[in-house]
Amino acid sequence: NVLLVSPDIQGELPQMHSGLNGNRLATLNGDFRAGLTQFSPDGNSLIIAYYSSYGELLRTDGTFIKLLSGRVNQAAYNPSNGRLIVGYDNFLEPTTLPAEMLNSTNGAVIQVFSDEVEYMEFSPNGLYLIIDYVDKPGELRSGLDGTLIREFPDELQASSWTFNPLETFIAVIYETQQVEIFNTQGIYTASLNDNLRFSNGRVIFLDRAQTATTLYQDNHAYLLDIEWLNAMLGEADTLLPSQLISLACQYPLNNGEVLDDPELLAELQKYLDALKVCEEFSER
């Protein structure tokens, strides 16, 4: 219920108005970048990115919270806990300004990151934060306080990632089309065999029972039990593709951990005796 208004009259500053009654709440300090100005999910604050001056963190009633450390070039609110990560434009700065994690309620700095950030994104539930740096490997961090959980391999460039619904696992797809699936505490990693490279970099987590379906280069979809894959502690790399696929699909069925849905079980039953297990399953 807040409007940011740029005046038509030259020399006048933009203003913040109430969307309920039109009252002016605040006068801004310059022309703002509409695409980078964001409101918090709870609607209590917003970050203002200016073209030629340092950004600001404001409350939606117009009161001032914090002058930011530089000119904002990217920002992301945590969807669940009031955290905010801000990246800065270093083009005109004498030294590199690292990204920061802030408390959006009071502007307190929670974490300062070690380098210039190229891309940043919170997980859907806000539990984790993905950081992709300009000159160093990407990282998985806590969405609460920004602490480091895992650094991605420096010889690979992560191109996309996806979390399962409970965010206990993450699949990271690299530019080489290799994929790693590991739990979000960074304890176990399952690197799939090079022969099982993805045709489109897609991993779909199906349910909270830690099941994922993947689409490989032969255009067939396969069901993987992620708990089992992690329990193998890297042994997946020693298996032939057919062996891995067969074992990965048989394990959850034999242990009764995944396929509790009778309709899903019936759908998969016809594929269990073939090497192309779970074929045409990608649309489920």
Image (cartoon, rainbow, N blue to C red):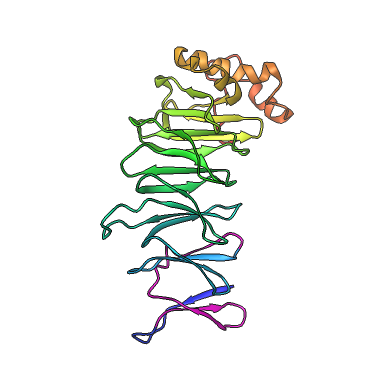
Q: Name the spot of residue 214 as percent of width and height, x first.
A: 51, 30
Q: Mostly what secondary structure, the magenta segment?
A: loop
**Residue sitting at x 35%, y 35%:** 157
Q: Nearer the viewer, residue 122 or 27?
A: 27
Q: Answer left or right for 167 relative to 156.
A: right
Tell me the quadrant of the picture where the N terminus can be found. bottom right
Q: Name the spot of residue 142 as percent of width and height, x first.
A: 53, 42
Q: Nearer the viewer, residue 261 or 41?
A: 41
Q: Say above or below: 175 vs 108.
A: above
**Residue sitting at x 49%, y 26%:** 220
**Residue sitting at x 45%, y 16%:** 237
**Residue sitting at x 74%, y 28%:** 262
Residue 133 falls in image quadrant = top left
Q: Name the spot of residue 204 as percent of width and height, x first.
A: 54, 35
Q: Answer left or right for 136 relative to 230.
A: left
Q: How many marks?
A: 0
Q: Nearer the viewer, residue 7 or 256?
A: 7
Q: Say above or below: 146 vs 262.
A: below
Q: Say above or below: 146 vs 179.
A: below
The answer to if 34 sits in the magenta stretch is: yes
Region in magenta: 13-42
Q: Residue furthest bottom?
A: 9
Tell me the quadrant of the picture where the C terminus can be found. top right
The answer to if 95 sits in the magenta stretch is: no
Residue 238 falls in image quadrant = top left
Q: Name the spot of residue 89 as percent of width and height, x first.
A: 33, 58
